[in-house]
Image (cartoon, rainbow, N blue to C red):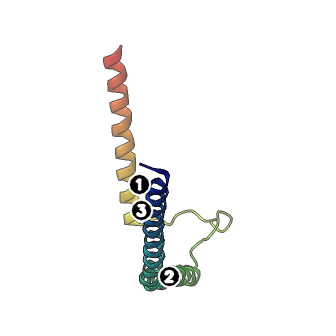
Amino acid sequence: MNSSEFIYTAVSEKMNLDKISDSQSQFLSLFDMAFKKSFETYFKQLLVILNRTEFNTRWLLKQQDIFMQQLKVPQTMEDLTFSIIEHPITEKAKDLVLKDVRKMASRKKELKDEQE
């Protein structure tokens, strides 16, 4: 192969590489533009959903806060200055909790006895 053929093949290979590179860059720019157009609507819908969720959460928290204030439920430890009023439900709950505590204590004691 003489030098003119070498130069000709080198130039043609360079031109082919440039064409491929140009077509790849055009494809990437078109792909980028198409992705941005398609994602933009999805992103806006997602933002709308997130904003709606945040609004609903704040709204429900505010409703609960107003409701609790109207019930005069103590909101802090300082507000809680009275003892729990005796009621059958509170007595039953107290008995159930004491029963559970006794069961756990007896299990703990049994485990200690087994280990010794």
Q: Which residue is mark 2?
A: 47
Q: In this image, 83 relative to 115: left or right?
A: right
Q: Secondary structure at mark 1?
A: helix
Q: Which residue is mark 3?
A: 90
Dot 3 alpha-carbon crowd within 10 angstroms: few under 14, some 14 to 19, many 20 or more = few
Q: Amino acid at mark 3?
A: Thr
**Residue at image x 41%, y 62%?**
90
- The residues tagged by marks 1 and 2 sit, at their Cα atoms, a distance apart of 48 Å
Q: Amino acid at mark 2?
A: Leu
Question: Eyeballing the image, is 74 above or below 56?
Answer: above
Q: Earlier in the sequence, mark 1 or mark 2?
A: 2
- Image position, residue 112 (x, y; %): 37, 21
**In the visual, does 10 lie left or right of 83?**
left
Q: Which residue is mark 1?
A: 94
Please name which of the two marks, 2 or 3, marks the residue nearer to the observer: 2
Q: Identify the amino acid type marked 1.
A: Lys
